[in-house]
Image (spheres, grey):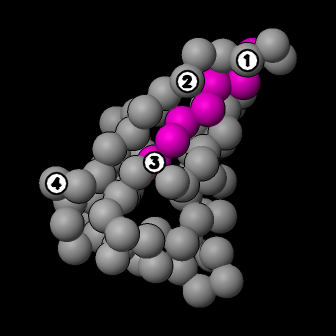
């Protein structure tokens, strides 16, 4: 899942070296939180107009997680 998020984000930004993903331990209901970190000037590229790109990234990640029977949440920091 981490590799998927890195691949998607690095394809969208101007500074792919600044992209990183951190993973939290599963919380009480079993949801794993992934934190996507990008450079400050690339935030607009990741979020998109009215949050459309961010919503698409979260949808793709959730779909991949469902296939592996996981519960995840993606936060863009």
Residue at (67%, 39%) from the top-left corner?
A: 73
**Label 3 sits on residue:** 36
| Viewer-nearest residue: 66 or 27 | 27
Residue at (49%, 27%) from the top-left corner?
A: 23
- Residue 60 picture location, percent across and down: 57, 51
Q: How many marks?
A: 4
- What's the magenta bit mostly, secondary-structure-wise? strand
Q: Using the rendered image of the protein, determine whether residue 14 is visible from the camera's viewpoint.
A: yes
**Label 1 sits on residue:** 27
Tag 4 near tag 2, CB within 8 Å:
no
User: For the residues marked 2 and 3, what is the alpha-carbon distance in whole angstroms?
Assistant: 11 Å
- Secondary structure beneath label 4: helix
Would you say 25 lies left or right of 45 here? right
Q: Earlier in the sequence, mark 4 or mark 3?
A: 4
- Residue 68 picture location, percent across and down: 60, 22
71 is within the stretch colored magenta: no
User: For the residues marked 1 and 2, what is the alpha-carbon distance in whole angstroms?
Assistant: 8 Å
What numbered label is drawn on residue 17?
A: 4
Residue at (23%, 55%) from the top-left corner?
A: 18
- Secondary structure beneath label 1: loop
Residues rendered magenta in the picture: 30-36
Q: Earlier in the sequence, mark 4 or mark 1?
A: 4
């Amino acid at each position: 899942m981490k590799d998927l998020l890195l691949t998607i984000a690095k394809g969208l930004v101007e500074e792919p070296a600044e992209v990183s993903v951190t993973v939290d331990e599963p919380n009480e209901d079993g949801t794993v939180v992934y934190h996507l970190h990008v450079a400050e000037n690339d935030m607009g590229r990741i979020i998109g107009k009215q949050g459309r790109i961010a919503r698409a990234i979260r949808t793709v990640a959730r779909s991949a997680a469902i296939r592996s029977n996981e519960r995840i949440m993606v936060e863009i920091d």
